[in-house]
Amino acid sequence: MKYTSTRDKTLSILPSQAIIQGISKDGGLFVPKTIPKIDNLMELTEMDYRQLAYLIMSKFFTDLEPSLLREAINEAYGEKFSHREIVNLVKVKDRYILELFHGPTYAFKDMALSILPHLLRIALKTNNVNKEVVILTATSGDTGKAALEGFADVEGIKIAVFFPEKGVSQIQKLQMITQEGENTFVVGIEGNFDDAQTGVKTIFNDIKFKEIMDKHGYILSSANSINVGRLIPQIVYYFYGYLNLLKQGEIGEGEKINIVVPTGNFGNILAAYYGKMMGLPVNRLICASNENNVLSDFFNRGVYDRRRELILTSSPSMDILISSNLERLLFYILNEDDGAVKDKMEGLSKNGFYRIENINLEDFYGDYSREEEVTNTIKDVFNHDGYLMDPHTAVAYSVYDKYRLRTKDDTKTIIAATASPFKFGKKVADSIGLNTYEKDEFQILKELEDRTGIKVPEGIASLREKKVKHNNYCRKEDMKKILCKFLKVGEAFD
Ligand SMILES: *Cc1c(COP(=O)(O)O)cnc(C)c1O
């Protein structure tokens, strides 16, 4: 299996190289040259998560030593997850909630970031790279912590995380700034997630900077969802969820399902789309946005337009106007025309928008929910069905409610649940009617626990006692400078 770039199809590299590089030199994203198929789903229903993960990942990461890949999977999807089956499928009314937040940092990012460090380690070994790797990560809240957790104290790797100082929840911020590990570095930046992400991309595309890094024995890589080492592991749970339904007899062989995904950078739902291309019986992929509804506009009008103010919502991990992974979908819907993808992406960067014409987007349905709908959804589902959702999951649930009303489509449906409600305790508590006025975050969590009977996860409760290890703040223009300080690289930059 080889990978190519969405912006230059003449490129051809090995999976391990795609993992190390993160993003292509031409600015494009790596995509596998062929899509492997998985059939005979009926025969796979007895597999546990690890076995299924190996089946899928080994098809995409063909140059990683099989025994090492297997070991990595066993290590990543083991005791660090609080749920024995790694993910959990819960039926609420007639829908199936696929809980992806039982990993060490309580968000779905753990599904991929618990294995990415292992994949990177093996990839480096495969390519005999002896340099120290610097992982650069922009985060809207959850990626940062999950990456820090995965990479902390991994030998030969340093990790720097940039988060929007005002754009994350209190718990998300605490999780990051209390991170231990000599090789970790966390910086709050002035600006929003798009600023952080653009800043990181600019660093990646700065050839002069890369040369200086090289001179100091560093190579740069990314833990963001543009890395195929994150994308591919995310395909696994969609198959797992489907097989689970099949095994329980909730669906019949070959029966199609809908999948609803609360979406920001378009990584999670893209993995579901890959699943569909690989043969997973999917009817519709329902892309749920919050008030930053660029994607729902795109699916409804064929225009991607980021020329609007970013709105800070209660689902901060979806407060994004530039959904990087959409570039991969473009590549497929434009019939793998790399030149056309390049045009669109350059248009986006220059003019702030692009339009696609006469394209069939039937596989997708896009809509969004407003803050008030999110609040009501958390409240109603808790009151009527006893199920407690975080705001991101509630966006998906609410969009699905509207989809049902509008389309009357009663295809069985999986809704991806992407974070523990305790990561966004204040919003959740407010929504179900608890009084949070002038109470501190931990008091609120305790009351939420008392009211719902669901225990505050240990890793969140313990944040209260943790020491702050990172107290860095910079303007988005200064990201390179502060990174150099961390790496003890002396050169000055303009
Ligand atoms: C990252 C994240 C999302 C959005 O996922 P994308 O892959 O960026 O679309 C949704 N919910 C939560 C809780 C997240 O952390």
Image (cartoon, grey):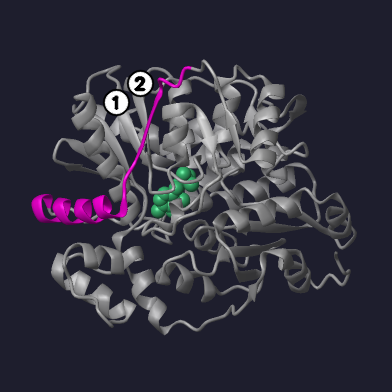
Q: Locate residue 66, reporting x and y percent.
A: 60, 36
Count of picture labels: 2
Badge 1 or badge 2: first in the primary sequence: 1
Q: Locate residue 93, reporting x and y percent.
A: 13, 40
Magenta-colored span:
360-385
Q: Residue at x 30, y 54 (%)?
A: 371
Between 288 and 177, which is closer to the camera in this rendering? 288
Q: CB of mark 1 within 8 Å of CB of mark 2?
A: yes
Between 471 and 313, which is closer to the camera in this rendering? 313
Q: Quadrant of residue 231?
A: top right
* Label disc, if present, on residue 257 of the rendered structure: 1
Q: Residue at x 87, y 72 (%)?
A: 490
Q: Residue at x 56, y 32 (%)?
A: 58
- In the image, the residue with mark 1 has its CB under 8 Å from the nearest atom of ligand 1: no
Circle 1 Cα neighbour tier, 10 Å, few/some/many (<14 / 14–19 / ≥20): many
Three-letter code, disc 1: Ile
Circle 2 Cα neighbour tier, 10 Å, few/some/many (<14 / 14–19 / ≥20): some
In this rendering, would 34 be left or right of 272?
A: right
Q: Which residue is mark 2?
A: 281
Q: Locate residue 110, reporting x and y percent.
A: 46, 53
Q: Please identify the quadrant where the C terminus is shown.
A: bottom right
In this rendering, would 140 be left or right of 422?
A: right
